[in-house]
Amino acid sequence: MPCSTKIKEYLSTKNLDAGTTAYIAPECFMSMDNPDMHDLRRSVTDRTDIYALGIIMWEMLARKRPWQGLKPLLVAYQVAYRSLRPPIFELGPRCPANLRQLIEECWCQEPKQRPSSQQVVDRLLNILDELPPELDDPPCAQQPPAVPSEVMRTAIMQPLAGVAGPVAAVDLLPFQQRSK
């Protein structure tokens, strides 16, 4: 099935590039092409975000952007009408099978078949618990030293006092206290 004129118009706008297109769920492209689903807002649900999360997880594990070098229109066609996804084998042998399976479920063509947000969290926690010890490496970088609260308060308030006067600095204090 060829892409509709609406999809071509949408993907040829200056505000959309292949990077953005890579994370758009198939139902969003298909709603542009279907007169019965002309309202894109009806096709965007929490499961639309799960699709994007699956792409992001693939991107992090593959260490590259999905669909590199492809035009947005081709990405839309491949995702919406051919049900293609980035190659799962590119995740490498160290990627646990249950994580691969979760990513593929996040990519399901049918939104109702994708896991819920809570299911994704639960499964990721289980996957983390099941990691072999050799994959449980310490973080790459050490945590930065803690900055004393008085130093932070001075650093925040000094620029404000110089620009907006003492009222702005005083107005900031209740906000800081609420955010703790």
Image (tube, rainbow, N blue to C red):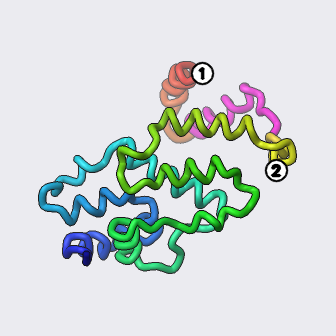
Looking at the picture, does residue 25 appear above or below residue 146? below
Residue 16 locus on image (x, y percent) = 37, 68
Residue 51 locus on image (x, y percent) = 44, 52
Between residues 155 and 52, which one lies in front from this camera angle?
52
Image point (69%, 32%), residue name: 152
Cα–Cα span, label 2 and label 1 = 28 Å
Mark carried by residue 70: none
Looking at the picture, does residue 103 appear above or below residue 136? below
Q: What residue type is labelled 2?
A: Cys
**Secondary element at image label 2:** loop
> What range of the chain is rendered magenta?
144-161
Between residues 11 and 38, which one lies in front from this camera angle?
38
Residue 3 horizontal side relative to residue 104, left or right: left
Residue 134 locus on image (x, y percent) = 86, 47
Q: Which amino acid does label 1 sit on?
A: Lys
User: Residue at label 1?
Assistant: 180
User: Residue at label 2?
Assistant: 140
Image point (13%, 56%), residue name: 36
